[in-house]
Image: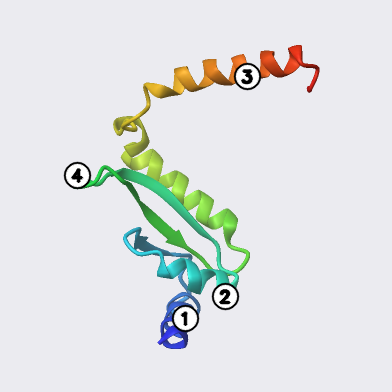
């Protein structure tokens, strides 16, 4: 089963001369195939699952050494749809608190002359 799915993944990209595949980020099996083939993946955010608040995204897969193309595709998608600007992470308000806590930890470590 693994080899069949891996072959299909490779075939779609190389035989059809595709710059990349667009894959919904609902299963992570594709990461196994891409890793095995040495193919890069990039995921752009789409939102949060209403049933469990987990983030999900849209995955772009390319052939080996196609990172620059995938970055351009992902950037173009984000520019066209602006999803990142309309979706606020559920716990975004905690970001400021975490930064304050990190600064306090750094000051504490400096007092102890550990850093």
Query: Disc 4 and disc 2: Cα gap in Å?
Result: 34 Å
Q: Which residue is mark 1?
A: 6
Label annotation for residue 37: 2
Mark 1 and mark 2 in contact (Cβ < 8 Å)?
Answer: yes
Query: Disc 4 and disc 3: Cα gap in Å?
Result: 35 Å
What kind of element bears circle 4? loop
What kind of element bears circle 1? helix
Mark 1 and mark 3 in contact (Cβ < 8 Å)?
Answer: no
Q: Which residue is mark 4?
A: 50
In the rendered image, the vertical position of residue 96 relative to residue 84, given as above or below: above
Q: Earlier in the sequence, mark 2 or mark 3?
A: 2
Side of 46 relative to 20 (left or right): left
Question: Which label sits in the foreground, 2 or 3?
Answer: 3
Of the pair 16 and 22, the residue shown nearer to us: 22
In the rendered image, the vertical position of residue 108 relative to residue 56, given as above or below: above
Mark 3 and mark 2 in contact (Cβ < 8 Å)?
Answer: no
Label annotation for residue 92: none
Q: Which residue is mark 3?
A: 105
Q: Residues within 10 Å of mark 3 (few under 14, many from 20)?
A: few
Coordinates of residue 54 in the picture (x, y in percent): 31, 46
Colour pattern of the rendering: rainbow
Side of 77 relative to 62 (left or right): left
Coordinates of residue 45 in the picture (x, y in percent): 37, 44
What kind of element bears circle 3? helix
Which residue is at a point 60% across and 69% down the rendered structure image?
64
Which residue is at a point 49% across and 71% down the rendered structure image?
32
């Amino acid at each position: 089963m693994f080899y069949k799915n891996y072959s299909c993944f490779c075939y779609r990209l190389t035989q059809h001369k595709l710059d990349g595949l667009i894959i919904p980020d609902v299963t992570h099996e594709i990461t196994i195939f891409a890793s095995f083939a040495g193919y890069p993946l990039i995921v752009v955010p789409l939102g949060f699952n209403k049933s469990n608040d987990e983030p999900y995204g849209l995955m772009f897969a390319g052939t080996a050494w196609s990172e620059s193309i995938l970055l351009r595709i992902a950037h173009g998608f984000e520019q066209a749809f602006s999803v990142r600007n309309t979706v606020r992470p559920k716990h975004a308000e905690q970001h400021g608190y975490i930064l304050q806590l990190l600064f306090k930890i750094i000051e504490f470590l400096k007092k102890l002359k550990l850093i």
